[in-house]
């Protein structure tokens, strides 16, 4: 499970189970419990049609929030007076930043005090309509890596497209009390990260971890940062979804597809400022986490009698898709080397993308007329290679989708 880190404490629960199951429901001895390994299934077949099949189950892992154990350091509330105004982007701009909300004493109160969203008692917080992006107070762990929790405090999930910018500055935050609280801290931030919402959407009430070092190194799925040293070496101001125009650092312009950031739509743009506390220490799990994508790569070998050659033909599957989730199937093939082992695999080609709203349905099995995916058409001449690599990626929406079964088939035809 991927966690978001900040200076507030919560506790995740976890689940376990083997990632890939054989037909008898037993974990293969070389598989273990970790996802992403590469079991090799060798299928012996006579001339005619044979079938490669498998079954996959995923244990859902959810984050949960318990009592707040430690407040963020020093200055924590970006407001001009001790009293804040309840509501999305109030006209007087007496608002709370740092992933705090204006907690009111009653449903009819128009003023309140700033409280952390994840603190017990924050039920008094009223979410804005639609998506509402905030950033918790960032921290630097004992290894020197900076973590910034980015949250969606609205009552709707983020869109599943677009890129969300977290900009970093060496100066102080803008003061609340005027419209400056919604203004850019600088039109050309020297450091920044991008969250690709197509890969890592943020459900309502959830946070994601921007691990700057991993994102800069390309190992954090859905997040990119300009440099591993961003937001480090001294305390920094930060702003999520800053107003347009904001010039991106050159290292992120290619990822974004333009040199200037266009602000995403959100209900409350006055609570987007935050602070990165870069003294070394312990970063704690922060808030409820959306489930990270899970990926599995499986390799199959089609075997035919002498004088016959295999041809990969069809993929069918059955999934269960919670709202906003998807399961992506992709495949590539490789020739056999002289010693019988696999050669170099070609690029993975998308075979199906099962979504709650999309052309590929949740269930596309043998009983669904005309639904089977045509591997031969997608793979082209590569369909004649004996090795097939099947990549399966599950992307969470409100929860992680379940992949129940899949079937890959091939035929053995006379060799030319």
Image (cartoon, rainbow, N blue to C red):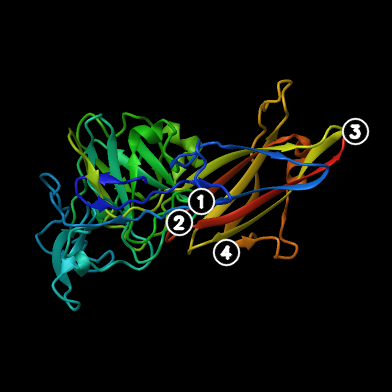
Q: Is residue 259 left or right of residue 170?
A: right
Label 2 packing within 10 angstroms: few (<14), some (14-19), many (20+): many
Ranked by sequence position, the earlier of labels 2 and 1 is 1
Residue on which disc 2 sits: 400
Label 3 packing within 10 angstroms: few (<14), some (14-19), many (20+): few
Per the model, the C-alpha gap separating discs 2 and 4 is 16 Å
Residue 207 position, x and y percent, is: 32, 52
Per the model, the C-alpha gap separating discs 2 and 3 is 45 Å
Query: Which numbered marker is on residue 416?
Result: 3
Per the model, the C-alpha gap separating discs 3 and 4 is 43 Å
Ranked by sequence position, the earlier of labels 1 and 4 is 4
Label 1 packing within 10 angstroms: few (<14), some (14-19), many (20+): many
From the viewer's side, name the closer residue of 315 and 262. 315
Ranked by sequence position, the earlier of labels 3 and 4 is 4
Q: Secondary structure at mark 2?
A: loop
Ranked by sequence position, the earlier of labels 3 and 1 is 1
Q: In the figure, 363 relative to 187: above or below? A: below
Q: At x 19% / y 69%, what residue is drawn?
A: 124
Query: Which numbered marker is on residue 394?
Result: 1
Ranked by sequence position, the earlier of labels 2 and 4 is 4
Between label 2 and label 4, give the one nearer the viewer.
Answer: 2
Q: Secondary structure at mark 4?
A: loop
């Amino acid at each position: 499970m991927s966690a978001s880190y900040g200076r507030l404490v919560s506790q995740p629960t976890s689940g376990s189970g083997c990632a890939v199951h054989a037909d008898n429901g037993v974990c293969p001895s070389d598989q273990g419990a970790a996802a992403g390994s590469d079991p090799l299934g060798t299928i012996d077949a006579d001339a005619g049609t044979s079938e490669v099949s498998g079954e996959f189950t995923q244990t859902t892992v959810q984050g949960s929030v318990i009592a707040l154990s430690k407040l963020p350091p020093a200055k924590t509330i970006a407001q001009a007076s001790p009293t804040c105004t309840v509501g999305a982007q109030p006209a007087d701009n007496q608002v709370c930043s740092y992933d705090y909300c204006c907690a009111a004493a009653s449903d009819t109160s128009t003023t309140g005090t700033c409280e952390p969203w994840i603190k017990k008692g924050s039920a008094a917080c009223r979410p804005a309509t639609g998506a509402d992006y905030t950033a918790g107070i960032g921290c630097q762990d004992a290894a020197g890596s900076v973590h910034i929790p980015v949250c969606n405090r609205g009552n709707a999930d983020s869109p599943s497209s677009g890129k969300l910018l977290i900009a970093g500055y060496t100066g102080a935050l803008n003061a609340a009390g005027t419209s400056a609280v919604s203004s850019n801290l600088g039109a050309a931030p020297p450091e920044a990260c991008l969250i690709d919402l197509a890969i890592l959407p943020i459900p309502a009430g959830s946070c994601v971890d921007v691990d700057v070092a991993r994102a800069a190194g390309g190992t954090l799925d859905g997040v990119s940062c300009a440099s591993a040293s961003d937001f480090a070496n001294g305390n920094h101001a930060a702003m999520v979804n800053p107003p347009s125009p904001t010039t991106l650092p050159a290292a992120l312009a290619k990822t974004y597809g333009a040199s200037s950031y266009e602000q995403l739509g959100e209900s409350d743009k006055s609570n987007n400022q935050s602070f990165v506390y870069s003294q070394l220490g312990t970063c704690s799990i922060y808030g409820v986490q959306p489930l990270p994508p899970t990926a599995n790569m499986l390799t199959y070998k089609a075997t035919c009698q002498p004088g016959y050659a295999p041809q990969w033909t069809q993929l069918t599957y059955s999934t269960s898709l919670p709202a906003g989730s998807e399961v992506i199937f992709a495949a590539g093939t490789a020739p056999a080397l002289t010693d019988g082992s696999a050669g170099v695999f070609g690029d993975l080609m998308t075979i199906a993308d099962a979504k709650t709203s999309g052309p590929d349905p949740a269930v596309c099995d043998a009983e669904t007329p005309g639904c089977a995916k045509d591997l031969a058409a997608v793979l082209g001449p590569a369909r004649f290679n004996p090795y097939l690599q099947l990549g399966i990626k599950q992307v969470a929406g409100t929860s992680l989708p379940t992949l129940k079964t899949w079937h890959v088939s091939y035929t053995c035809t006379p060799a030319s």
